[in-house]
Amino acid sequence: MQALYAQLLVGLINGSFYALLSLGLAVIFGMLNIINFAHGALYMMGAFCAYFLLDLAGIGYWWALIIAPIAVGIFGMILERTMLQWLSGLDHLYGLLLTFGIALIVQGIFQNYFGSSGLPYAIPDYPKIFGFNGLQGGMNLGFMFLPIYRGWVVVFSLVVCLATWYLIEKTQLGAYLRAATENPTLVRAFGINVPRMITLTYGLGVGLAALAGVLSAPINQVRPLMGADLIIVVFAVVVIGGMGSIMGSIITGFALGVIEGLTKYFYPEASNTVVFVLMVLVLLVKPTGLTGRAA
Amino acid sequence: MSALTDDTLPANPRAMREEMIVFAAMAVLLAAVPLSGIYPFFVMQALCFALLACAFNLLIGYGGLLSFGHAMFLGSAGYFTAHALKEWHLAPELAIIVGVAGAAVLAVITGYISIRRQGIYFSMITLALSQLLYFIYLQAPFTHGEDGIQGIPQGYLFGFINLSRPTVLYYVVLAGFLGGFLLIYRTINSPFGEVLKSIRENEQRAISLGYKTDQYKLLAFILSGTLAGFAGSLKVFVAQNASLTDVHWTMSGEIVLMTLVGGLGTIFGPVVGAFIIIAMQQYLAGFGQWVLVIQGVIFVACVLAFRRGIVGEIAHYFRRSL
Amino acid sequence: MKQQLSALLLGTALALGSGTAAFAQDKNVKIGVLTDNSGLYSDLGGAGSTLAAQMAVEDSGLAAKGWKVDVISADHQNKPDIATNIGRQWIDVEKVDIFMDVLNSGVALATNNLVKEKNVVMINTGAATSDLTNAQCSPNTIHWVYDTYMLANSTGQALVKAGGNTWYFLTADYAFGHALERDTSAVVTKAGGKVIGAVRHPLNTADFSSFLLQAQASKAKIIGMSNAGGDTTNTIKQASEFGIVAGGQKLAGLLLFITDVHSLGLKVAQGLNFTETFYWDLNDDTRAFSKRFSERMKNKAMPSMVQAGVYSGLLHYFKALEAMGGNPHDGAKVVAKMKEMPTDDKLFGKGTIRADGRKLHPAYLFEVKKPEESKGPWDYYKLVGTTPADQAFRPLSESACALVKK
């Protein structure tokens, strides 16, 4: 039983990454009607950005948490301005193809310069307050040894997810955003610069991916292909949850992380495939996804 | 929403005559390859991929369905055929049937699941399903995991055609390719193909006209998957191995790329695209990962500036359907 | 016409393959380094392997004796089908005589078939699979540096001897991982240890925490990692996070290279135990070679055992060619000659090549130093134990190789 609690907690950690990534996908999809295949590559760029900050400029984790999402977000906005915006009005599939191409380019370039094996990124060892050594070390919860960093990832991503949800569902800005999704012409008539809003939204979604990348850097090796395989799982998560609602993608992300964690305990051989199998089951029972409206 | 492709010219006897002339020219050219001194293995491989891309194109170009998991049919059929040849010692023709039948069954199942959602969801589902299959093949003992099935005997087709002779194998592969190509061509110009195109243009209208569009889409998916499987079975005889490469998502991406470069929804586009991409891989192999970057650049360039693809642009220029 | 042409081509191929008498004085040799230039193993082999081959050509002094030796290299991208395509073209068009490196087991087995079919030579220094000299052995292939049986054997035995008598396995769930686990379990049990359990994780897992928790709960003294590449480095990294080594359990890598330690950093990798057959800092000869090597590397890296194997294997190949007085372009014949001659080079010392194609040399168990013990870059290992050449590898009595007369 104790081991089970531990696995649940571990599952939540993976769920955090699924939630952050599928949230970003949903935000982008809502506004641009594009499935951002480059999301995994941008997640990877976030991690690399943190690595560069530390390695080249000596800027540590806490600053990277702010700088990397902004830097990668700006990169995303440039992508949107120079390429993606030319696709508006075309079949959605072109957006998928274009972002797939971008993902290949970004991953290929990083692979050329950094190989495929990972680069190390240490867990921060500051600030040293209340007896904590930054986020290093761990604490004994009785039923498991919880590395502090992992606990931090869960808490922090929850906060970010909820903040994003609040921004989009409860604020004035979010209201414009949602309105622009439904009827861009009308919103433009109100004097709102819709193209700029689209650009900013893409930047926000990309920033979330980069943030997830920074969070994962100390846990996983910083690798050029770290996002490539993850993104396919996140696609399955998105299909399961549907991209209709922000909250839906957050909850599905965390829930699937937990289910995957339990699989690792009860039937580890299937832990890679469980999300896909669930996707098949959901599609058979409820083709529109758990929270989604009909496409 | 604008249409994915540009071949809105209706099929008419003149267009069909022209297409047959191009087809005949292509067949003659390909038949002459062994005389030319071009390395035959390269052309054989390209032919397998060309058939694969044509099968994929049937789905996207005429059905409007972008499958991002078509590698699963290629790879699965390859594994089945390889296993049948190596472990069961079946004759080549039977091994091909095993592979193609396996791909067909797979297409029925995956098609039934994935056509439940449209547009981008369909693409994501096919991608996820192929990834699921990838993991299964990775663990299944009969595929030998990362090692793949190696050293597959080529044997004698129908008991007397020696497939281990490169020239003989070349003509067998060419015959397979031409047969598959004609089948696809025939399908596109059949009433079934016309319904498919109408679904691509406007599914709601097709439904309101009384067509059960899901059944048509499923049938197209099965046909496409089965032919992709046939390409996979043929490829086993050329490469003499079956490996995870052929079920990986990068392979699915390459299939999309080939078709996109040649021209979505054009008849000859996928063939041209396949030859270009395979040649690129062959001659740029020394550049390693840059090949991926170049592929990405081609993707981006095609989508932004060149959506009709090579054959599509030519056809558009001459106002012909090719 | 077609028939004639292909008959002609076939005839030329035959003449090249079997015309040993006519070509006895042929002093042209073409070496193909088939490796991973860009992927997961590019640090292990890659450009370093090509450099090692060039250094072997230079050091052999063959050019001065009228030989013409060319080295070409290509990236097989870890895909067996790409590898066989390149290989076929190398043999048919470029007339390559010998394949070097060929890391990645899948690629190696595919190339093994091709090399035998076309009667050229492969000295495999990079692949782990012990099948190359067992069920899949070939008269054209020599397996030079290491294999899974040896790794399991050396690491398992030495660790049990040092007191690590209870084992828990963390195994990648595919054929390769299973084989490593099976071989190591056998060795551990035979040496008097006990295997408490195992958990199978899918290949290319990003998060190992769940599996590590299970390993931790098993209370085994040794956690054996029957996985490779990114999976192993991720395991090690996350194990340090969960305080596994600090808690008294030891991690044993069953397939780990110096390049992995380099990318992990000593802080994370310290205390790891694993086997290699070459380390740059073993003796004066290895140090001298490694210094020359690293000066010519773009990133100043020290040679891995795979790269060292390319150098050492090629030197032996050249010796055999010299003894034959020319290049017969007959792979099986050259390999037979190489098996006849004892090997002796500065990197792997004296050794022999067995009938099954297995090159024998000692295996070393290393422990990774603590950061404070390391005196500089690439100073990573402490030598913990040595298994003599005749005990390190699979004994011929257990061999399933058809070349072994029983």
Image (tube, rainbow, N blue to C red):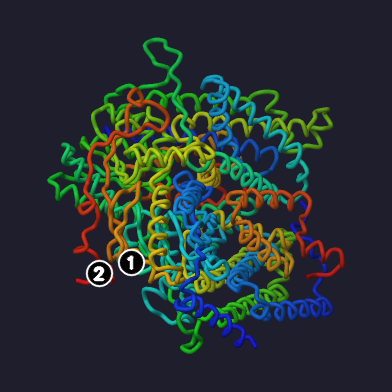
Res C73 label:
none
Name the residue beneath numbered marker 1. C137
> Residue sitting at 47 percent across and 76 percent down?
C17
Name the residue beneath numbered marker 2. C404
Name the one closer to the observer, C184 or B256. Answer: C184
Residue A125 percent coordinates (x, y)? 43, 18
Q: Secondary structure at mark 1?
A: loop
Q: Earlier in the sequence, mark 1 or mark 2?
A: 1
Residue B107 seen by the camera = no
Q: Secondary structure at mark 2?
A: loop
Q: Is residue B224 left or right of residue C286?
A: right
Residue C212 percent coordinates (x, y)? 32, 37
Eyeballing the image, is C378 above or below A274?
above
Eyeballing the image, is C122 above or below A4?
below
Q: Is residue A84 left or right of residue A239?
A: right
Q: Chain of mark 2?
A: C
> Residue sitting at 29 percent across and 64 percent down?
C134
Q: Chain of mark 1?
A: C
Residue B131 percent coordinates (x, y)? 49, 53
**Badge 2, how many Cα within 10 Å: few under 14, some, many 20+?**
some
Three-letter residue code for mark 2: Val
